[in-house]
Structures are given as C-alpha cells and as structure tokens.
Image (spheres, coloured by chain):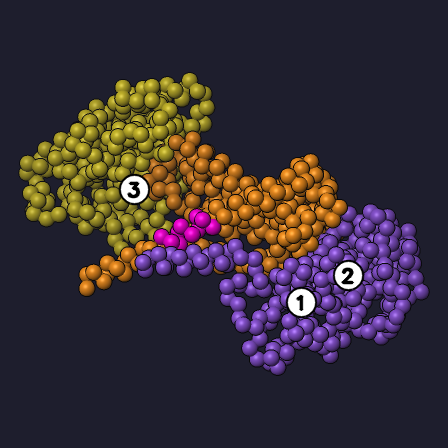
Chain colours: A yellow, B orange, C purple
Amino acid sequence: MNTKPAPDLVVQNLSVHYGEQVALKDVTLQIEGGQILALIGPSGCGKSTFLRVLNRLVDRSAEAHCTGEVFLGDTRVLDPKTDVVALRRAVGMVFQQPSAFPFSVFDNVAYGPRLQGVRSASRLRSLVESSLKQAALWDEVRGKLRRPAASLSGGQQQRLCIARALAVSPEVLLLDEPTAALDPLSTAKIEELILALRGDYTFVLVTHNLQQAARVSDVTAFFRQGRLIEIAPTRDMFTAPKCEETEEFLTGRYE
Amino acid sequence: MKRQMGMGDQCLYRVVWVGAFSLVVLGIAIFAILFWGTAKFVLAHGLNQSLLGLIYEPTQGRFGLLPFMAGSLVVSGIALAVAIPLALSLAVTVVDMTPRRTETVRQILSGLVAIPSVVFGWWGLSVVVPAIRWISGHSGFSLLAAGLVLAVMILPTLSLLSINALTRVRVQWVEGSLALGATPDQTMGRLILAVSRFPLLEASIIALGRALGETMAVQMVIGGRVLLPHGLVSPGATLTTQILTDMSLLPPGVSGHHVLDFMALLLLAAMYGMVVLLERTRRMSP
Amino acid sequence: MKRIGIIGMLWGLLIATGFYPARGTLGVLRVAHHVSIVGATSLMPLTKRFVPEWEQKHPGVVVSIAAGGSWAGILAVTEGHADIGMADLIPPSRLAVRLVGYPAGRLAVAFIANNKDGVKEVSESQLMQLLLGRIPNWRSIGGRDEPVIVVSRPLSSGARAMIDSFLPPPGLSADAIIQLSNGAVLKTVRDTPGAIGYVEWRPGMGGVTMLGIGHHAFDTTHLATWPYFTKPTFYVHKRASDLVKNLAQALSQAPAKTDFGIYRGHVITPKGLP
C-alpha cells in the first residue's frame, strides 16, 4: 500500500516542559525505518508526551514547550516552519480509548481522504476497502459500511481507527496503548495486525502491557520520570537489561 | 430512630411525587382549557373568519388570525436568522480558548441571559427603531425591529447552549481528527459541527421557543398593526402581542373572548410541533 | 390518613388558585375586608397615590389595584370579579343599568404631532382625515414633506373609544401603530417624524406639538372649554357595600386629581359623545 519507505526516527536531546513541570528531559534515541519501537514505563513517565511530540499534538497544550531535535526522515518535526498538517498526514495515530467518530464505518475511514480533497465516490470506496482490508476488518464489516461505527465492538472500533489512520497513507504509526481497553482476543488481533504491517511503517507503540512489548516490538525504550533510562533491542532488554532500574520495573518491583 | 428516618424519607418522596404529578395535571389542564375555548370559538365563528381570515376586527366579529401567524413566523425567523450565525461564530471562537477564558465567557453570557426582556424592549425602542426609521424612511416600528430585538435577546441563551454543545464533543474525536491531518477549520466544520448538529438544532429550537413566546419586548417595537404585513419594515403584530393587546378588550364573557384561547393554542401547537420534529430527526440520526 | 391529608391540601390549593376565577387577587387568600380595583391605566396613578391614605383611615381593609383597561374594569365590576372599575369610557346601557358611577371630572384628549411635522393646527375635518389615514403626507396640509404615521391606543382603551365614536366608518386608520399606554404613544410620537397621535393629557407632557383643532387652541390653563375629553369614572356594582361605595366616591373626589390632569369642565356639547 505504502509506496514511500518508512522513515527513520531520530530524537536528539528532546525536552518538554508544561509550564514549570518537566515532562521529558534530554531524550536521545534512534530507530530505523520500518521498525517497531515500544515505549514502556510507569504512569506519568512521559511516554505519551513523547508520542504527542512526534505528531505535534503536544501543541494543543498552550503551556507546552519543546527543545531539542526530532527527525522523521528528513522532516524536522519541531521546526516552527514545518507544516503540521502535512506532518500529521504522514504520522497516523491511534488512541487508547477507541476514538471512532460518531459517523458510519465508511465515513470514519473516508474522513482522512476527504480532508485531502478526494471526492470521487469510486476512489473513496476503493480506499476504504483497501484500508479496511489492511486493518483486517474488511471481512467483518463488508456490507455494514453504512452502520454507525458505535455499533462495532471495542476491538473492531480500534481496528477501524487503525484503518482510518492507514487511509491517508502515513509513513509512521503512533499507537497510544491501543489495547488497554480491550479483551485478550481483540488484543491478540491488534497485535497480529501490527506484526502484519511491520516493515511498511515505522511504529511507535506505547504500552502498559510488558508482554505486548516483548511480543511485538523490535526495540524497547524504558522511560521513568521523563528520562529515557534504557533503550535496547527488545530481546536484549527483556533477557538482560543493563540498568538496575529497568530490571526492577520488568520484574514488577514497582509500578 | 430508623423508623423515623424512613417516615421522613417517605414524606419527602410523597411531596416530590405530588409536585411532579401536579405539574403534569397543570399542563394537561392548560391544554384542555385552551382546547375547550378554541372549540367554543370555532363553533361560534367558524374557521373562515378566524384561522384563515385576513381581517381582524374583534368588535365587528371578524377574527382573522393570519396576520398574527405571519407576524410570529417572520419575527422569529428574522431572530433565528440573525442569532444563529452570531451564536455559532461565538461558540466556534470560544471552543478554541483556554478553559479559564471559556468559563469567563460563560459567566458573562449567563449574566446576559438574566436580563429581563423589557430591557431589551427598551433598548429596541431607543436604538433599533430609530435606526430602522433612519435607514428605511418608515416609522421604524416593524417586524424587522422586533426580529432584531429578539435576536439580541436570544443570543446569550443560544450562544451558551451552542458553546455547551461544542465543548461536549469528545477530546479523542478532536485529536483523532487533528491526527489525521485535519486543519483546525476542517476539524471544526467536518467533525465538531457535524457531531453537534443535533444539540445545536435543539438549542435553536429552545431559542425559537423563547422568540415565539416573547411578548413585552416585541410589543414595544413591533407597532401593533393588525393588517397582514407587506414587508419587513412594515409594522405588524404577533400572536403573543395581540393576546396582550386584546386581553382587556376581550375579557371572559365577551363574545370573541375565546379567540385568545385560539391564539394561545396555536402557539402551543407550534411549539409542540417543533418538539415532535426534533424528536423525529433525533431518532433518524445515527 | 396523613398522606391523603397532605395530597388533598395541595390539590385543594392548586384547584383553588388555578381554577377559581380570580377575585381581586388570590381566590383563597381573601382578607375579611378586601377591595379590588381594576381598570383604566389613565386612572392608575391617581388611585395608587390616593389608596394608601384611605387605607390608613380604614384599618383592616386591604385594597388591591390592577391595570387592564377601561373595558376590563367595567366588565370585572358587572361580573363581580372586582369591586371598583376605573373607566374613561361610557358603559353600554345593558351594563350601565347594573352600575353606579362616580365621575371624577374630565381628562383632556390632546392631539399630538411630532415637532418636525411642521403643522401647529388643523381643522376638525383635517384631523378626521388624518386619523382615518386619508392624508398620506403632511405636505398636503401645509406641513413638511413627511409621510403621516398614525399612532393609536388599542381598542380596549377609553381614549380610543372616544376617538372611534367621532370618526365615521371605517374608523381609525388600520395602518395605525398601536401602543399600549398613554406614555408609549407620547414617546412614539415625540420620536417619530410624521407621527400624529392622541393622549389623555396630564401635566408634564411635552416634547410634541399639541395640535390646535379648528378655533380651539390646546391651552392647558383653559382646558375647561377644550371639546375633546373623556370622563374618567369609578364604577361600582349597584349592590356594592357602603365601604366600596365610600372608597369609589372618595377616589372620584380626591384632591390630588388635578395633579393627574383631571379637571371640571364647562357644560359644553362634547364632541363625539351623546
């Protein structure tokens, strides 16, 4: 589907302040295009903020202030001259709570393409179909495209949100605890889907579910109190963490 | 001790129950009385001289209500046509403000909602009527003046309801839209307004209800002419202002008194029709 | 038992307040001696000023005053809904036989024009044509080039009844702007170029041209000969109590009435009145 190669993600000395409060401090990391980066860490460690920096949703908080450099491919994410709208088209996002719009299934997926001016009904239909197929939802919703999205199950809605994000042909996908509100079966389907899409997109996955990070990701980063404690290939991280803090977290000694 | 509490609760429950039930009975009673009066009136005068009539001369036994129905419709129409865009613009602006500023705007609007309608009427008499007189060359007392006064009067309510409607749109939806590369304007137009169209429609109907029912402020600026209005700057009358004007001319016992019931029933029916319409559109919405 | 008592009481109150024809104020809350007054707005200020004084001299009596127009006043008294009806119109004879009237004097009806109309006096036939709506522009009777705008009171007003009685059919211009009170008519005429209207005159009215009619100038110091007036009267039912009759008579003779423009007229043939 995606013709452009998935871009590398390079973060240098990223700090984010909300007023006086420090949300992220001096984060530096790098992953290759097409890899899946999992962010783990206790609540409030800054991993969601990190995600929201990547598509500049962090701008919505008037008090937020970012320093450092973030590159997605050639795009300087934090550069004030960067076209935020274009950036967000290239960086899809899926939220913790299923955020399907209160429209029909079809209109949810067609929302992004329509924003970009796609009017042709046949073009929209094929885009919707291919996106739903990519998100492994097509078989479950074909013939029900005019139904309200709210009539789908939670897991289906979450895959619908992924399909919605895919419909604008992004290069990067940000997943903010996408399975936190789902049952194990739906969770498994989402993980399957992420693995199926691996390579075509650069993924950043925030998760509370350590097994999920272990199952899905190529690289895992551990955040604590706004700092990046450790980043390593997932297999190394989960078998032999370098830092004591990481080990304590992974073995469940603190939350 | 326990038993006493129970009795207290029961007592309270009963008082509340009686209150609620009385309200229902009162509503039905009002409707029944108006309906009874209307029936008597129609039997005595027929429909040609009333509902469908153009000439209103109550002392001559002619009760044409079309001029007032037209007046009510036109005046409320002007009010909504002016107030809805303004209220929406305000709401759209406020939604993007910080919560604290939104709260300030809300407080100001709530203060404006509390202004008694006679104040708006006075403002209309001192500002709107002379302005229309100056622009149109007519007397200034007109449907347009009434419509504008009503527009200003319902604006705070309408804005407040619109702001509430728009801010109730879930953050995840807004961020979901932005994350798809929607500009703030696109998010407003395609998501926020689309999602809140029914609350907004509801707000408009509430505002329309206030506009249709307002009497004093309208009476002060509309001119009270009982002929079918021939233009927006022509004086006219509405169902409510005519009830007010002729309440003392047609007290109970006078032939034609029940035309007042008829006018009141028409207002009630119009409002009820709108509520039904709203319910129906809601049921059809996803 | 208690429950039935509470519900019954509430219901009783509801029915009593909602369905009982209002006698003065609240049907159920009648004081032993309660006198209710309803009627013409032109007599309201006088009544409101006088009543507290009278109440002091009659302890235990409570008087309520409500506006509603002359017609409402007369009907309320004949039907027994109120004790005293204030009116500045003559009740039709079928009602008059049941009433006793206490005339207060006269209220001059002044014809007022906007100061920019450029006309200070008109003949009586011109006045009638103006009110009938048959003179479209002041220019045609020597005034400025302004369209004539007739401002009137509603049909329930006593002043309006007096006007209608001397105009030939079809009566006052249907195009007229209707204002509910004397004050509103005055303000409208004062603010609207081209306007002509009529008010029951009382001291302090100004800012408009008081039109002279025919050879009568409107001279507030010589109102006794002004031919256009209403006769404000306090009506009571024939079978009313002495207390009520006493109040109506006292009201009609209240010394303060001159402050509100009520005067004694010379016996002349009034226009439009039989």
Residue A65 in the image: state x and y as whole percent.
Answer: 32, 50
Residue situated in front as seen by the camera: B190 or C153:
C153
Q: Is residue B27 left or right of residue C171?
A: left
Q: Is residue B39 left or right of residue C233?
A: left
Q: Which structural element holds mark 3?
A: helix
Callout 2 environment at 10 Å: few (<14), some (14 to 19), or many (20+)? many
Kindly identify which chain the residue marked by label 2 belongs to: C
Tell me the number on the disc at residue C90.
2
Compute the Cα span from label 1 to label 3.
88 Å
Residue B68 in the image: state x and y as whole percent.
Answer: 66, 44
Height in image: B104 above or below B186? below
The residue wearing badge 1 is: C239
The residue wearing badge 3 is: A52
Tell me the number on the disc at residue A24.
none
Height in image: C110 above or below B32? below
Kindly identify which chain the residue marked by label 1 belongs to: C
Q: Please give the name of the residue rendered at 36% of the width and 52% of the height, measured from the top-left corner.
A: B17
Q: Which structural element holds mark 2?
A: loop
The region drawn magenta spans: B17-26
